[in-house]
Every structure is written in structure tokens, then in C-alpha cells.
């Protein structure tokens, strides 16, 4: 092997240039491998961070939903009212002739809890509800809630609705949260036609 070849020289058009040596090519390959490894580690680290964040977000969401559900159940319990599912309430309404007082609420909604703790705990309201109506609770985000809202064209919550045993809408009660005035819509129902209240 000539000295020129051993030095990695190449003759081209009468000129001589230095050809890439084996050691130089190996250096390039090594740097490329290092770069690819670093990028791979960075990608893995990013994906790991995304997964961890997603897990934390989901955990917070479900824990909050559980906590809100606990608060809502606690608020319902303070009323002392017997709460039936809507379909059960309709059956009971057909048996007793009492209209259904349907409460459309959401477990995570502070206003729904206010309705429970500031309106339905009022002694006059509670007494009126127990004696004259079948009380039903409808969860806003349930399939039953979606069907209920679509059928009667309701969109807001919390809200109270009066229906007969044949699921005919009789009346919507105004939304009042003041403990002082919460009984007034129920008092007006006392003068509601008996035939409409007991079909």
C-alpha cells in the first residue's frame, strides 16, 4: 500500500484531496448514535411526564366527584324527606293519586345543595311535600336526567317540577333559595286545582 493511500488521499482530475478516514466516519456514527439515544431518552421522559400528569388529573377528577357526591348525599339527608327514583315515584303517584314533585339536580352543583339545605329543610315545605306529593330526585347527568329534560324541555338545574302519575307536566316551581320565602311556591300550590293535583 502506497503512503498516499495510507493517508487517505484521493487523486481526482489531477488534484489530490483528503478522503474521509475510517476514524472520522466512526466518530460521525458515534455522535449520531449519541444524539439518537439522547432524543430517545427525552421522548421517553416526555411520555412518562404526560402519563403521570394524566393519572394525577384523573385521580383528582374522580376524588372530587366522590367528594361532591358525598356532600350532596349529606345535603339530601338533612331534608329528612323520603327520596324516590323518578320511575318509582310515578308508580307511587298512580297508587296514591298524589302528584310527583320532581327535583332535577346535579351532585356537583352547589346550588343543588342550597336547594336541599335552605328550601327543602324548611318545615312548611317539608310538611307540604310529605303530605301532598311523592318526592323524586333526578340526577342531571344521568340517562334518566337527559330523557327527562328532553321530554319536558327543561335545561336548568336545580329545579322543581310537578307532574301527575301519567307523567303529564302540571307546573314548574320558581327557583327560590331564600329560607324566608322558600315556602311561597308551595303555598300557592295549595290553591292549585284539586283535579289537576289528583288526576
Image (cartoon, rainbow, N blue to C red):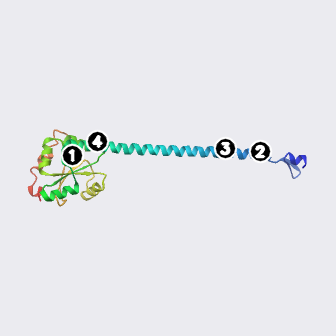
Secondary structure type for disc 3: helix
Point 31% across, 43% down: residue: 68
- Label 2 to label 3: alpha-carbon separation: 15 Å
- Label 1 to label 3: alpha-carbon separation: 67 Å
Q: In this view, does 40 lie to the left or right of 180?
A: right
Q: Do the residues labelled 4 and 3 touch (CB within 8 Å)?
A: no
The residue under label 1 is 175
The residue under label 3 is 34
Local crowd size for mark 4, using a 10 Å CA cut-off: few (<14), some (14–19), many (≥20)? some
The mark found on residue 71 in the picture is: 4
Q: Tell me residue 162's x, y (percent).
A: 17, 53
Disc tally is 4
- Label 1 to label 2: alpha-carbon separation: 81 Å
Q: Which of disc 3 and disc 2 is earlier in sequence?
A: 2
The residue under label 2 is 24
- Label 1 to label 4: alpha-carbon separation: 21 Å
The mark found on residue 54 in the picture is: none
Q: Tell me residue 72's x, y (percent).
A: 27, 44
Q: Which of disc 4 and disc 2 is earlier in sequence?
A: 2
Amino acid at each position: 500500500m502506497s503512503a498516499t493511500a495510507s493517508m487517505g488521499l484521493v487523486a481526482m482530475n489531477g488534484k489530490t484531496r483528503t478522503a474521509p478516514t475510517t476514524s472520522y466516519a466512526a466518530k460521525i456514527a458515534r455522535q449520531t448514535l449519541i444524539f439518537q439515544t439522547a432524543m430517545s431518552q427525552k421522548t421517553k421522559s416526555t411520555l412518562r411526564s404526560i402519563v403521570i400528569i394524566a393519572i394525577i388529573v384523573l385521580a383528582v377528577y374522580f376524588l372530587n366527584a366522590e367528594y361532591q357526591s358525598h356532600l350532596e348525599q349529606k345535603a339530601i339527608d338533612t331534608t329528612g324527606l323520603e327520596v324516590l327514583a323518578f320511575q318509582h315515584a310515578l308508580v307511587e303517584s298512580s297508587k296514591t293519586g298524589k302528584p310527583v314533585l320532581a327535583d332535577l339536580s346535579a351532585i356537583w352543583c352547589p346550588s343543588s345543595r342550597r336547594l336541599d339545605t335552605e328550601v327543602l329543610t324548611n318545615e312548611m315545605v317539608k310538611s307540604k311535600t310529605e303530605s301532598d306529593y311523592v318526592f323524586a330526585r333526578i340526577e342531571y347527568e344521568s340517562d334518566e336526567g337527559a330523557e327527562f329534560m328532553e321530554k319536558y324541555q327543561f335545561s336548568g338545574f336545580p329545579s322543581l317540577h310537578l307532574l301527575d302519575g301519567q307523567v303529564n307536566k302540571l307546573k314548574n316551581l320558581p327557583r327560590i333559595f331564600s329560607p324566608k320565602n322558600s315556602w311561597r311556591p308551595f303555598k300557592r300550590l295549595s290553591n292549585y286545582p284539586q283535579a289537576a293535583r289528583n288526576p
